[in-house]
Image: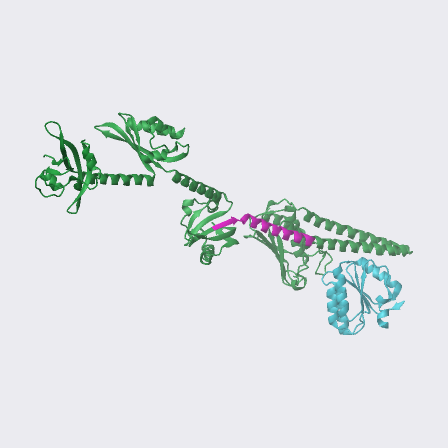
Amino acid sequence: MPKATALVSQEGTLLDASCSWLKMFGLASFTKGKGPEIFTLFPENIELKQQLKDNLSFTLEHTIKVNYTTLHLKSHFAPWFDEKENVIGTIVQTDDITSETKKQEELDWLHNILETKMEVSKTGWWEFDLKTEELFWCKETKRIHQVPENYLPNAQEAINFYKVGYSRNKASMLFHRVTNNLQPYDINLLLVTYMGQERWVRITGKPLVKNGKIIKVFGTIKDIHEEVMANTRVREHQQLLSTLVDSLPLNVYVKDLESRKILVNKSECNYLGKKPIDLIGKTDFDLFEKEYAQISREEDLQVMKNLTPIIGKETKSVLNGKVTHHLTSKIPYFDLDGKVCGLIGMSMDITHMKKKEEQLRSLNAIAVMQNQKLISFAHIVSHNLRSHSANFSMLLGFLDAEKDPTERLRLIKMLRQASDNLLETLANLNQVVDVNSNTLVIKKPVHLRHAVVKILQEQSALLEHNHAQVTNHVPEQLQINCVPAYLDSILLNLVSNAVKYKSPDRKLQITINALKSQKGIELSISDNGLGIDLNKYGNKIFGMYKTFHNREDAKGFGLYLVKNQIEAMGGSITVQSEVDKGTTFNVSFNEES
Amino acid sequence: MKKVSCIFIVDDDPITVFGIKKMLKSVAECDDIQIFQNGHEAHEALKERSKTGGTIPEVIFLDINMPIMDGWEFLDELIQLEIKEQIVINMITSSIDPLDHKKWADFKDRCPYPLNFKNKPIFKIEANELGCMGIAS
């Protein structure tokens, strides 16, 4: 196909043109010599007139509007010579390059998009030609490296941009592998820019293979420094928070609106004896007894509904049958929009403190009781000793004034009596002191039935003399943890008490029972004797030197001693009685040592 | 020497009883001195005498700490007997418990008879303890 051609005179008048040329410019055929001025066809090129005068070849790209469409044209201007090499005009050859131009524009546009995309995503690309060993960096790649735009990189320099140590070794190794083993890569490494800044980048590389042979390596580089740093900060915060929450000596948990646990710390897991995975999603109803779970749920609802925290509330719960006490705080938990989405709970286990408090309280009660006992004992001592010393004073006063030798002898006899009484009282008091001062009484297991049998044998003469009928119901296998000497004294006193206060109208019957209960071992000794009016004497029966029957051998000391001995072993004694029916003493032994 | 028709000594301590009797010998003349080991016995005797029109004791020596019925309980019972005759009651005790002293002060207000409080040891029985002042006033 011949090119669209036109001939132009030296003055610039169109002399002749091919049909295609005319069509291109939207011109009808014209009479020879009467063509239009060429310059009117190139309105964009104001210098054309001058250029034509120079008689040199040149090319112009220009547009023309024909029938409302714009054509992109490319015209070549060349001098037109006659046979004698004289310039007689210009030959114009024109190509329609509209489609090429469009393609170029499209390409430019795509290129622009790519450039923008790379800039925005901070991703650059690079290419390494294995044959020429040339490395190409795109604009963005250069920007990431902070090198000037005219910088020409090579492979070794590119690798040296990575931080000495792990990053550089890795970059070098990966580049080696992709070129030798065709192994693509994608990794985050630390880059030191041309300006000396350390920045995290994500780099990829993959081989471009042609006919089974690698010809190029293509890769990308993305600046991810801000992301990595933000991520690191987030992880540092998380680490700080989780370390803090886990190491707090508190049970910490977060619950959602349904009171399901969505976070638990180590203390909470240890307390519940479960792993976090077994606790997440669980409610208190899954973990505690219903009664306590319900209380907890009501607290949760209160906090989430009223948005007011509960701070330092003493709570009680039962876990696996064990009672635990906590100091619990619950605070509403808000999401990022400020809407309540659950609660944060913290509880401090104060079970051991509670236990200590109870121990302290019971110790205090013991101390108070001991103190009262001491005071009452001091009164007893002062009263008893005083009455004896008063007698001495009185008798000595008489003796001083008495002349009659018979009377004097009588007074001396009475003084001796008073002295004996004093000694006996002192012996009694000593016994009581002994019992009460041996705070570390050593308890031993004793076969109760054998102990009872032994006392009954020792007292057999007394029992037979009084025609007593004794029934021993103590079970064969019952072991009792007590001070053996005290047990003997208790049994002896209670049995002889029953004999002492038997009814003259009935044959004496004594029944001894024992049973093991939750509280310990209960021993009871019942008789059908005189009985005591407990309304009248109930509070005095175990008092010292209190007697209630007119009996010569009643000294009012036995029961007092028994009570002291039982209490020294941590037990207790009670009495039931009805006048002229009988009396039952119940002894509770404390099995703890 | 004052003549007294009847005296009750209520005390479980034989030495004290002996002492009181001995001291009485030098200050009073009495043919009817009764000894009781506790309040219960004395109360029974007094009840019997009051019922049968027997001699009501003019003077009672009363111990506080006694078995079965102590001195305070005896006083309660005695007040209830509503005996018209004058009885001088001397409480004799080795107790220095302030509670006992307070109790005595309470009884003194509601007891229709003169009520004396004497701490052991005693060496002498005063005239007012035999009712001399009581009768005069």
Establish if A296 lies above or below A108.
below
* Residue segment shown in magenta: A345-373
**Residue that protrudes farthest toward the left in the picture:** A31
Q: Is residue A359 magenta?
A: yes
Q: Position of residue A54 (x, y in %)?
A: 19, 32
Q: Residue at x 78, y 52 (%)?
A: A422
Q: In front here: A275 or A502?
A: A275
Front residue of A523/A520: it is A520
Q: Is residue A203 above or below residue A384?
A: above
At 30% from the left and 29% from the top, the residue drawn is A135
- Closer-to-camera residue (A522/A408): A522
Q: Main secondary structure of the magenta part?
A: helix
Locate the N terminus of chain A by quadrant: top left
Q: Is residue B132 visible?
A: yes
A530 part of magenta stretch: no
* Chain corresponding to green in the figure: A
Decide if residue A491 is in sight here.
no
Q: Which x, y percent locates residue A387?
A: 79, 56
Q: In the shown orientation, is residue A471 left or right of residue A560?
A: left
Chain colored cyan: B
**Residue closest to the eye, A23 or B31:** A23
Q: Quadrant of residue A154?
A: top left
Residue found farthest to the right: A403
Q: Residue B20: x percent and y percent?
A: 83, 61
Q: Give the quadrant of residue A47.
A: top left
Would residue A524 be found to the left or right of residue A316 on screen?
right
Location of residue B19 in the rendering, given as x and y in whole percent from the top left corner: 84, 59
